[in-house]
Image: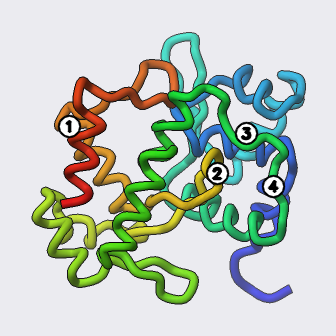
Amino acid sequence: MRDGPDISIIASLIGNPASANMLMALISGPALTATELANEAGVTLATASGYLARLEKSALIALERQGRHHYYRLAGPDVVAALEALLPLAARAGHLRARTGPRDPELRQARSCYDHLAGGLAVRMYRAFLERGLLAHKGREIEVTEAGRRSFARKGIDMKELQRERRPLCRSCLDWSERQHHLSGALGAAIFRHILERGWASRRVGSRIVRFAPGGEQKIAAWYRR
């Protein structure tokens, strides 16, 4: 075997259906308990605990302790990026779940996807950025154009700060309810923070749902269209 990282161990963990279901549950929301993740994976708590131990040992997830409660989250943005990269590959190969996304209208409209915005609003925003030439496809990647850098800076996004981050500036993330793409990466996270900091929307405690303040949805639409 050649020297260097052995991807087979990580690939086997991500490729296991139960582990994959738990990882995807974590990419879409806050930290979850082992019981919640067992329910997401459709396995017993004992089985889930075994998988979680292996995922933690391989640095794909991290354990957080709050008193008697234990919560699991993805270990970092590099794990998120790896999982996001697999979504369009799975979709292109036709490996789609029968479930087309959440039934709750609020979850379909706007929800958190790790640290960025997902749902119908996020898909419309991403499409608008492309149509206005702020983002552009470069092969299978997505990049911010020069016009986009100026526009996002005017919108209050610190582009120079984002470029210093080690994670990709922008990525397209396949939205699991809309079956279209929304924006992730450092720029997607910064836009979500911008929306929350201005009080246009807020996260519902204990849920992935993002709820709008009065007039908040209109303010967000006006912000990304200007």
Q: Which residue is mark 3?
A: 22
Classify the position of the N terminus by image quarter.
bottom right
- Three-letter residue code for mark 1: Glu
Q: Nearer the viewer, mark 4 or mark 1?
A: 4
Q: Up-down: is 87 above or below 93?
A: above
Please report whichever mark, 4 or 2, sits nearer to the chain's N-terminal start.
Answer: 2
Q: In the picture, residue 108 is in which quadrant?
A: top right
Pick the front one: 209 or 72: 209
Classify the position of the C terminus by image quarter.
bottom left
Residue 201, image x, y percentages:
30, 32
Pick the front one: 177 or 190: 177
- Three-letter residue code for mark 2: Leu
Proximity of marks 4 and 1: CB atoms separated by less than 8 Å: no
Q: CA distance from mark 2 to mark 1?
A: 29 Å
Q: CA distance from mark 4 to mark 2?
A: 23 Å
Q: Which mark is residue 197?
A: 1
